[in-house]
Image (tube, rainbow, N blue to C red):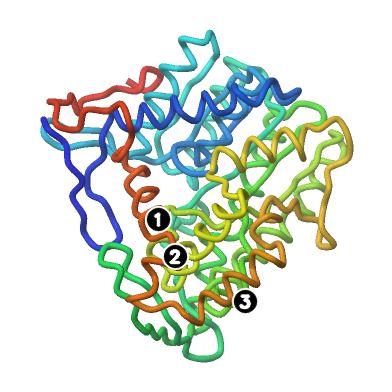
Amino acid sequence: MIIEPRMRGFICLTAHPEGCAQSIKNQIEYVKSKGEINGPKRVLVVGASTGFGLASRITAAFGSGASTIGVFFEKEPAPGKTATPGWYNSAAFEQEAQKAGLYAKSINGDAFSDEIKQKTIDMIKSDLGQVDLIIYSLASPVRLHPKTGVLHRSALKPIGQTFSDKTVDFHTGVVSQVSIEPAVQEDIDNTVVVMGGEDWTMWIEAMKNAGVLADGATTVAYSYIGPEVTEAVYRKGTIGRAKDHLEATAFEISDVLKDLGGKAYVSVNKALVTQASSAIPVIPLYISLLYKTMKEKGLHEGCIEQMQRLFADRLYNGGEVSLDDKGRIRIDDWEMRADVQDTVKSLWSKADTDTLKEIGDLAGYKHDFLNLFGFGFDGVDYLADTDEMVNIPSIL
């Protein structure tokens, strides 16, 4: 079939397998170009099929030669219907890992469930024995709690008062005002259950009890802070409460790992184009202005650049891990530089439908969004007939 991007709101309903494969190859080549990392050798990535989780898996495998197990929840293809991009990403990753002689297996299912945790533990025991790095990078809007059976849905809302500010429809470039009503306590509680640190703890405790954590095992989860312009809807909103919980959980998990000589970290990463961020009001406009600013200053990074720097410069640099005053790794340091934020703040006041084409990087935003689904890559013939029925070797 000929596969074209088919949009519905902030979602692309199709994905291109060859484009996703090209994305994986590009990321692998970047990691290899930066040289070897004296990093982990047996790695589990929970949330391994897109974004920071995928980039972490690529960095571990092709930066330090790690064996990797990836856990994700993706939709496989059907005749005439494409898979989700994470499925194609994972298929391509396994193919490239096998070419390089690297162990790579994947598990597709609900990572919140006890069943998938046990399946993962069994695979580790059978194939790797133990793991020395666990990346926790889930980005789900809902969670079926494995103990209570309750389905929790996260909410994207401010806390305390109605939020109003500018946003942009990145498809059309139209800048408009948006208002979001404040959360009630149930919204906050549900968001913390879905996006907070409870499930991260469950993973680590289950793995420790099963004896599959190596001495000195490290675990890392990902967070975001962002600037003042987004804080009402993000860091000081319902998602921010969940991130607060996630970050506090790192200290609790470090206590769990203490007798193994292990440690839990939260890495605060840069704002990037993701399926999730595209649906958050204000964020696309902020990212458009941020991209323009950081590209002009030679500071722009995507997921793979961020994760390669996290592994090489922070986690496995041969010395102490540099932390902020709240115990977090700050890979958003370039985004939050005063000169970057001062420029973005100045541009924000000028941003409207007419000016954004000049002062922002909406074209870069759109390009990165299409890349998420395997579209817009050089070297891919998007007019050619393409086989949508791609298998993941370790699953099928």
What kind of element bears circle 1?
Answer: helix
The residue sitting at 64% across, 58% down in the picture is: 335
Please tell me whether residue 175 is drawn above or below residue 206 in the rendered image: below
Quarter of the figure with the N terminus: top left
Q: Which badge, 1 or 2, is on the more N-terminal residue? A: 2
The percent position of residue 354, horizontal first and vertical second, equals 33, 76
Is residue 175 shown left or right of residue 24? Answer: left
Please tell me whether residue 138 is drawn above or below residue 230 in the rendered image: above
Q: How many marks?
A: 3
| Mark 1: amino acid | Tyr
What kind of element bears circle 2?
Answer: loop
Q: Which residue is mark 1?
A: 365
Q: Does the residue at mark 1 contact the one at mark 2 (Cβ under 8 Å)? A: yes
| Label 3 – label 2 distance at C-alpha | 18 Å
What kind of element bears circle 3?
Answer: helix
Q: Which mark is residue 263?
A: none
The residue sitting at 75% across, 51% down in the picture is: 329
Crowding at label 3, few (<14), some or many (≥20) Cα neighbours within 10 Å? few
| Label 1 – label 2 distance at C-alpha | 9 Å
| Mark 2: amino acid | Gly
Is residue 283 shown left or right of residue 39? Answer: left
Give 180 or 171, whichever is nearer the viewer: 171
Q: Which mark is residue 360?
A: 2
Crowding at label 2, few (<14), some or many (≥20) Cα neighbours within 10 Å? many
The percent position of residue 363, horizontal first and vertical second, equals 36, 55
Q: Which residue is mark 3?
A: 228
Please tell me whether residue 167 is drawn above or below residue 305 in the rendered image: below
Please tell me whether residue 105 is drawn above or below residue 367 in the rendered image: above
The residue sitting at 62% across, 50% down in the picture is: 299
Q: Which badge, 3 or 2, is on the more N-terminal residue? A: 3
| Mark 3: amino acid | Glu
